[in-house]
Image (cartoon, grey):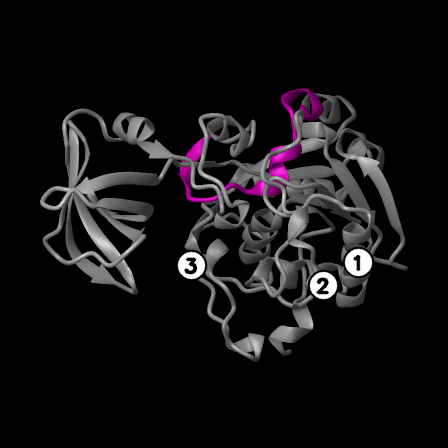
Amino acid sequence: MKIDDFDYPFDPSLIARYPSPKRDQSRLLVLERQGGKIGHRRFFEIGDYFKRGDVLVLNNTKVTPCRIAGKKAVTGGHVELLLIRRQEGDTWEAMAGGRLRIGTKILFSPSCCGEVIGHQDGHVVVKFSYEGEWNSILSKIGQMPIPPYIRRDPVEEDREWYQTVYASKEGAIAAPTAGLHFTEEMLGSLRAKGISVACITLHVGIGTFKPVKVEWIEGHQMESEWFEVGGEAVEQIRKAKAGGGRVVCVGTTSVRALEQAAASGEFRNASGETGLFIYPGFQFRVTDAVITNFHLPKSTLLMLVMAFAGRENILKAYEEAVKLRYRFYSYGDAMLII
């Protein structure tokens, strides 16, 4: 399929620069895969579409405040880095805002500095020296890596806004944004209704920002990301399936983790790196419903939801969302595909 098959007319003014004042008050577009019927609700009403025995699958990855700024030790020039992968010890692979030569020393705080020791895949490799505990230092000098299309600098409130209420395992450089709509109260009410909650992990990586540059999408290579689908989650999902319940994935990351765990033909606990690329024609083995946000044109995320719901259904839903001025992307409104 051609990349242009995954385009749609879009108004940039619909990009949400800030989240809804209350997480669960965002709008919710409900799309039925069979027939393409579209409905409109508020997110806190999503429980109306679930039944006892269903299982909600959450990605419990936690976003690291990995956007850091400093000054070159010699010239004082401004440097901005996005830490994307820890290599060994205190050495990180990072995206840099400009060209940095090997040997460049960068001052981030009185107790933290770094030196560029190499280049890799268009990124820089930086070795850090610091006094104290790394996570504590990073929390002080780092900012949340909100996506560039939001077109503003991070603020202190993003530390809460750009994190799900159930985030527990640090390692992501972007949030699994479909989960941002949930509150602890909502999850509690769903459990009380007989809906189980299973947690898996997929640490969202740099691939979430990587555009598809090939004309034919089959030639696109996904960046690998670490995931884990544990035995407890597998048992919960098997139990739901056996009892006639549905597996409702919160976000495309949960979909990719579960489908990777079933890639051999048997759904089982699994962990490691995944570069699973889901586009139309993919055979879903585990996922029955998806909660997601509205995605960028020509993005791998849009390709995944088109694979799940059908290209024409998604284009029709997006056309209506644009017409009704839904809020788009990371801090935007939500869609339930059933």
Q: Residue at x 42, y 44 (%)?
A: 173
State yes or no: discs 2 and 1 in contact (Cβ < 8 Å): yes
Distance between mark 1 and mark 3 Cα atoms: 32 Å
Q: Which residue bears the numbered disc 3?
A: 224
Distance between mark 3 and mark 2 Cα atoms: 30 Å
Where is residue 119 drawn, in percent x and y?
21, 61
- Decide which of tag 3 and tag 2 comes sooner along the chain: 2
* Element marked by disc 2: loop
Quarter in which the N terminus is drawn = bottom right
* Element marked by disc 3: loop
Distance between mark 2 and mark 1 Cα atoms: 8 Å
Q: Residue at x 61, y 66 (%)?
A: 298
Q: In the rendered view, does 64 fall on the left or right side of 146? A: left
Between 246 and 121, the one nearer to me in the picture: 121
Where is residue 203 drawn, in percent x and y?
45, 45
Q: Which residue bears the numbered disc 2?
A: 9
Q: Which residue bears the numbered disc 1?
A: 319
* Element marked by disc 1: helix
Please provide the residue range marked out in magenta. Answer: 168-187
